[in-house]
Amino acid sequence: EDKVVQSPLSLVVHEGDTVTLNCSYEVTNFRSLLWYKQEKKAPTFLFMLTSSGIEKKSGRLSSILDKKELFSILNITATQTGDSAVYLCAVGGDTDKLIFGTGTRLQVFP
Amino acid sequence: DARVTQTPRHKVTEMGQEVTMRCQPILGHNTVFWYRQTMMQGLELLAYFRNRAPLDDSGMPKDRFSAEMPDATLATLKIQPSEPRDSAVYFCASGFWQGWGNSPLHFGNGTRLTVT
């Protein structure tokens, strides 16, 4: 059965800290891994990763995929209070379904 | 800015009543997903459609849930009869699949359902 596991479940940091969020997966015929940020409402898309070792970067956020070890990390440097959210990882395989992990809740305090 | 539109935003109903949630996907998107989100289970996939055809609804309780796409601009999720355990936020998401891989899904703001 396809599975996505995220860790830690929650994280509390101070502004300026750097955080690393983890996502491990098991999926039949992996196609892509996606990261989303969810604040109060809809998840919003951050990154899609399909190839190992190629870093995707957007401002202070970056992500990389390891298809051999079946995991991805999402890094946020110099965190700000606006980064407080639930970060969701999702994986797609040959069924075209996107399976989501339960998320990591990040709280950034001033 | 194109977005997925869901109605209603909130719905409170009594156990046993029928609930219908609606979704307008982004114009041009050919794939529509329905997810349910609870604190305990996270985002669970209920059903999805490609070019209006249902591809998988194995995540839905078949006896009470039904999902349809009467046209390319409307997807519906119906619960009849509703139960308190159906209380959750229901998200619709759309994307454009080209057959060779996934593309990012764009989510609506969800329908928060409370069944008393």
Image: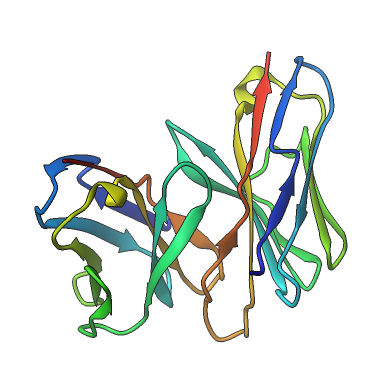
Name which quarter of the figure residue A91 lies in: bottom left
> Would residue A30 be seen by someone viewing this image from the given angle?
no
Residue at 41% of width from left, 75% of height from top?
A32
Quadrant housing the N terminus of chain B: bottom right
Q: Nearer the viewer, residue A108 or B26?
A: A108
Residue at 63% of width from left, 53% of height from top?
B108
> Would residue B42 be seen by someone viewing this image from the given angle?
yes
Q: Where's residue A9, x and y in %?
A: 25, 41
Q: Where's residue B8, x and y in %?
A: 75, 38
Q: Nearer the viewer, residue B19 or B5?
A: B5
Q: Nearer the viewer, residue B8 or A82?
A: A82
Residue A67 shown left or right of residue A18 in the figure: right
Q: How is the structure coloured here? A: rainbow
Q: Where's residue B41, x and y in %?
A: 45, 36
Q: Nearer the viewer, residue B66 or A88?
A: A88
Residue at 26% of width from left, 73% of height from top?
A59
